[in-house]
Amino acid sequence: MMRHQQRELRLIEFSGTIMHEEFEPFSRFYLDRDFYRFADREVVLFTPDVSLAAVDVEDISMLADSYIEALRLRGDQTAVLSAWVMGDHVRAETRLWWEFTRDHSRLREPRHIVETVEAALHALGCPQEWAADMRTHSGFKVFEAGDRAVP
């Protein structure tokens, strides 16, 4: 997870095999007001090498519950404008993610499902020039669990 503060843009990049152990630290990011801002535009990028085969229903449910709990604790009610960049190799698997988060869809704007970073930026109303920075992570701060302040 990365954030470009000046552009108010969050990049969540999934690559390689996503493991069960990665979900709990990821779920705690929602509580960090300085880093995770619900009002930021969000690009979720699934790289061509990503595999979601090791992700369980419980992992997705825990992530959705953590998101809603963070909204409750923080008191933020801003809907997230999100674009998901993915190839066909993960579209079926991500449908499960959407099923577990659809009950809370009122808290999110519709997710734009696109095939390229450029299409994601277009869907979010961002300049196309930002695509190169997203690919190289230029200007983005990488967020790690150790950076998070205790709420």
Image (cartoon, rainbow, N blue to C red):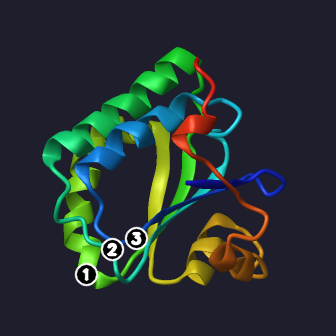
**Disc 3 or disc 1, which is closer to the eye?**
3
Q: Amino acid at mark 1?
A: His
Identify residue for label 3: 15
Q: Are marks 3 and 2 in contact (CB under 8 Å)?
A: yes
Q: Residue at x 38, y 30 (%)?
A: 66
Residue 115, percent from left and from top: 45, 83
Q: Amino acid at mark 3?
A: Ser
Q: Residue at x 23, y 38 (%)?
A: 61
Identify residue for label 2: 50
**Disc 2 or disc 1, which is closer to the eye?**
2
Q: Residues within 10 Å of mark 1 (few under 14, many from 20)?
A: some
Identify residue for label 1: 89
Q: Amino acid at mark 2?
A: Val
* Label 1 residue SS: helix
Q: Nearer the viewer, residue 47 or 102?
A: 47
Task: Name the image quarter holding residue 48.
Answer: bottom left
Residue 52, percent from left and from top: 24, 65
Classify the position of the N terminus by image quarter.
Answer: bottom right
Q: Is residue 122 left or right of residue 57?
A: right
Spatial CA span between label 3 and label 2? 4 Å
Q: Earlier in the sequence, mark 3 or mark 2?
A: 3
Q: Are marks 2 and 1 in contact (CB under 8 Å)?
A: yes
* Label 2 residue SS: loop
Q: Earlier in the sequence, mark 3 or mark 1?
A: 3
* Label 3 residue SS: loop
Q: Is residue 41 left or right of residue 29?
A: right
116 up-or-down from 69: above or below: below
85 up-or-down from 37: above or below: below
